[in-house]
Image (tube, rainbow, N blue to C red):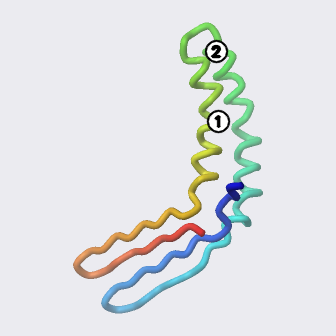
């Protein structure tokens, strides 16, 4: 079973300083839920407006696709290095 990501580790290194912190993503889920509840009437209006066109399917499945994209972020690693600094992001 695939669980949603719970932590994000962000590490920033430069010549002058090193900065690292852990961001608990499970604390952001209530904020995402509130945003979803605020935007859901607009999604419903878009689905009703697009019902007679061929875009209705895309409007309906876009919400599920966004949810799955967030759900499958676990294991994502981003490492960007420049000449003077580097940024490392890991989703756990």
Which residue reaches farthest front?
1
Marker disc for residue 63? 1
Residue 48, by quadrant, is top right
Q: Is residue 18 above or below residue 80?
A: below
Q: In this orientation, which residue lies closer to the viewer: 37 or 79?
A: 79
Q: Residue at x 51, y 84 (%)?
A: 20
Binning the other alpha carbons within 10 Å of mark 1 as few (below 14), some (14 to 19) or many (20 upward) gives some
Percent x, y of residue 17: 40, 91
Q: Quadrant of the C terminus?
A: bottom right
Q: Identify which residue is drawn at 64% across, 22% down.
A: 46
- Point out the image quarter for the N terminus: bottom right
Is residue 88 left or right of 45 when viewed as pictured? left
Relative placement, left or right, of 47 versus 14 is right
User: Is 32 rendered above or below residue 20?
Assistant: above
Q: Earlier in the sequence, mark 1 or mark 2?
A: 2
Q: Vertically, is 16 above or below 49?
A: below
Per the model, the C-alpha gap separating discs 1 and 2 is: 16 Å
Direction left: furthest residue? 83
Q: How many marks?
A: 2
SS class of the residue under badge 2?
Answer: helix
Q: Nearer the viewer, mark 1 or mark 2?
A: 1
Foreground pick, 28 / 67: 67
Q: Which residue is mark 2?
A: 49
Give residue 49's position: percent from left, percent from top: 64, 15
Dot 2 crowding, Cα within 10 Å, few <14, some 14–19, many 20+: few
Q: Residue at x 62, y 45 (%)?
A: 68
Residue 60's place in the image compared with 23, above or below, is above
Q: Secondary structure at mark 1?
A: helix
State the residue at coordinates (69%, 22%). Answer: 45
Percent x, y of residue 27:
73, 66
Q: Position of residue 89 (x, y in %)?
A: 48, 71
């Amino acid at each position: 079973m695939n669980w949603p990501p719970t932590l994000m580790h962000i590490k920033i290194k430069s010549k002058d300083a090193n900065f690292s912190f852990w961001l608990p993503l499970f604390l952001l889920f209530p904020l995402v839920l509130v945003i979803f509840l605020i935007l859901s009437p607009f999604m419903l209006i878009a689905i009703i407006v697009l019902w007679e066109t061929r875009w209705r399917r895309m409007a309906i499945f876009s919400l599920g696709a966004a949810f799955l994209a967030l759900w499958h972020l676990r294991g994502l690693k981003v490492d960007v290095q420049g000449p003077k600094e580097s940024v490392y992001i890991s989703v756990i």
